Image: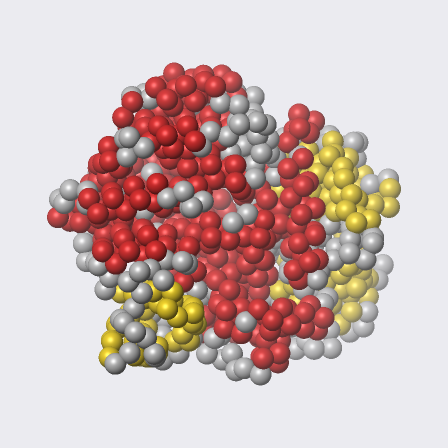
Amino acid sequence: MKDASPANAPLEIFLSDYTPPAYLVDTVELVFKLHPTATRVISKIAFRPNPEAMDRTFYLHGEQLKLIWAKIDGKDAQAKVTDLGLTAQAPDAPFIFEAEVEISPQTNTALEGLYMSNGMYCTQCEAEGFRKITYYPDRPDVMGVFTVTIEGDEKVKLSNGNDLGGGKWHDPWPKPAYLFALVAGDLVNHPDTFTTMSGKEVELNIWVRKGDLNKCAFGMDALKRSMKWDEEVYGREYDLDLFNIVAVDDFNMGAMENKGLNIFNSSAVLASPETSTDANFERIEAIIAHEYFHNWTGNRITCRDWFQLCLKEGLTVYRDSQFTADERSPAVKRIEDVIALRARQFREDNGPLAHPVRPESFVEINNFYTATVYEKGAEVIGMLKTLIGDEDYYKGCDLYFTRHDGQACTIEDWLACFEEVTGRDLTQFKLWYSQAGTPRVGVKEAWKDGTYTLTFTQHTPPTPGQDTKDPKVIPIAVGLLNDAGEEVHATRICEVTDEVHAFRFTGLDAKPVPSINRGFSAPIILEQDQDNATRAFLLANDTDPFNKWEAGRALARDVMIRMVTEDATPDQAYLDALLAVARDDTLDPAFKALVFSTPSADDIAQALFDGGVTPDPTKIYHVTQTLRQSVAHAMQDTLPRIYAEMQVDGPFSPDAEAAGKRAWGNVALSLLTRLDGGAQARAQFESADNMTQQLSALGALLRAEVGEDASKAFYEQWKDDRLVIDKWFSMQVTYAKLAAAPATAKALTNHPDFDMTNPNRFRAVFGALAGNTAGFHSPDGSGYALLADWLIKLDAKNPQTAARMSTAFETWKRYDADRQGMMREALERMKAAPNLSGDLLEMVTRILN
Ligand code: 0A1
Ligand code: ZN
């Protein structure tokens, strides 16, 4: 463990090496004397020996700290200090440790620990940032009651818990250091209140810079809805008198659930109709809910060690997706989640960075805030609920909340609650936590004498460090339809537990059409022989909205793959099926928009690779354009009507229904732009009174390469709004054609508004480059070289964000020898860069292996 001793701290940390902390903490008193380059932190910590410890080494983590003095029980601690921490002789009885350290928030560009963002002090302590604030046992299983005093001229000074006045705060709930937070600056608040189910009034605030006060109302409303939902669905009540949210411009992630003081990337909380798209509103609502839900799943019950990260993250993502489904449309949310899961988690699970939902070792924990831990972690919770049923699921959760309140727990603790409630052995289910890789599930059908049999086979390909896998328990929801499209069998959960596992459906009049893995009940790759006629049938008839969409997606994928591999022309059956969807007035517009979104270039590249074909991103680009052009032509008589019908009158509302109409209307607009040279899009761009309409129009114009004037006008209109200008940067790279993408990204880095130290701005340019598959993979290698150059530059300032963005290279082995060679070269160049951070080094090393 990192905790053993700094001198021989191994690089790689293993779950199996966990040992309990030597000392536990009762109380922590911190005084901050704020100064941009010389903040003093004075700490007084009450320690006591841990009866469960295996040794008595007194070791505190501490990095980039200048120690002024340290005392144990009032006497010089005679501390030995290294780059990673401090050791001292400590009594085998309770004692008080005190210290004063100096830190420099202004020069902290890593945005971890105490740092400054636009003149405001703020903190980010998860996972191991507290050790950059003061010496402390910075591990989640050490929990203390914090009292904090903030001294400085700042108008607003905030920390966790309850406000004692005069910059003094007290948090009555014991917490690990990663949930500590401090904010100080010239802030204003958007206040409100919430009355909990037991009648307690909670003061709520969203703190922002003055100019952003008009962007808080939606976030506040989302917070109140989240608080109510958690009471109604999980019976969880808020537990302090105050709940603060702060918006910060420079932040590595979306947001952070610090107890009573959530800190948000301003992009994840600030919203207004003029500046935020419908997608932004939905994301903000989900992140507010996510952070709020952590109060129980994460804060009241936390993780014993960072290997258990999915305990809080998988569960909290699952809870926030339930919330969004309830607040909006369950079908649309499920489809959106699966699109995202395939794009990020399947991609990760099928490449060199694949790791279990609960990893067994890591070098840098910040590199494990991944789609696997978060999104696959949430899928695992969803499967558990499917397997045991809703009632036992909520009973198990209740047991977990009562039994483990105030503790730092493991996945074993979590699963034991469900074993106890159900009497079911979850040993095989637990493999979902320990085995990496996406299971491939094959299915064959047989029909005889009124009995229909589905035989499933399962296989999970090798992943780094795991050559062979045991069969998992896979809950596959199956429905059966007759030729008329009617359900002939209630949806049944087939629990596939063996490598080969058959299920019989009896008493049928005729051979049915199966609808398999309804609702995407398991995160698998389903390999079924399904012809396009069956897909079109299911797209038209399936009563399960997810599989209805999935059938359309499979059809589109097949059409695109044949266009790539056989130079086929766009399939008429596909175009007819789309037309039928467009004309079906019973369907939700948001659903139609999703049916019309074709698989991404990255999806097609992976599908080709899986089928033994080396993908050519340039060709995929052309195929995508040809297909969309054909869709536009096939729909030309219908598009103006759809467009007109989807215009939403009256004041803007971000609700799901209005957003769905805009989404479908903008699909029509983007297709129309392929036919009318941009006339309609230009009109919409000019008349738009909200960002969804304005940005959709701009996108359509840029794609048609007629958006230059609109883009200039957009910049002039929004140049004072950082979040909108992020969109402006990103749009240009997203819609740059082929090799123009790297060149555009490069030119944008010279723009006066480009600021590499702001993660949102950096991602706006380089995230968009990585997401522009044909551009990033330009045959001349300019995309790779540019990204490598900038990741090396960014790494020197912000290793965490640089490391996260290096995943752009994780698919390198899919491509042809030339591209592979150039990507390898880019990766090797990063690896060899002088003073590379451990974060980025771990990532490039894993990607190269
Ligand atoms: N726990 C937060 C995400 C988060 C993780 C790490 C961070 O810095 C390294 C910041 C935020 C969440 O799940 O929302
Ligand atoms: Zn989280």
Q: Is residue 476 visible?
A: no
Screen quadrant of the C terminus: bottom left
> Is residue 450 left or right of 307 when viewed as pictured?
left
Residue 830 x, y percent position in the rendering: 37, 45
> Is residue 248 left or right of 774 when viewed as pictured?
right
215 vs 21, nearest the viewer: 215
Q: Is residue 401 above or below residue 507?
A: above
Q: At x 34% / y 56%, what residue is drawn?
A: 541
Q: Is residue 286 visible?
A: yes
Q: At x 41% / y 42%, what residue is drawn?
A: 585
Q: Is residue 568 above or below residue 418?
A: above
Q: Is residue 743 above or below residue 7?
A: above
Residue 515 x, y percent position in the rendering: 35, 64
Residue 273 x, y percent position in the rendering: 57, 30
Residue at the far right in the pictured view = 165
Q: At x 72% / y 67%, what residue is drawn?
A: 405
Q: Is residue 218 above or below residue 423?
A: above
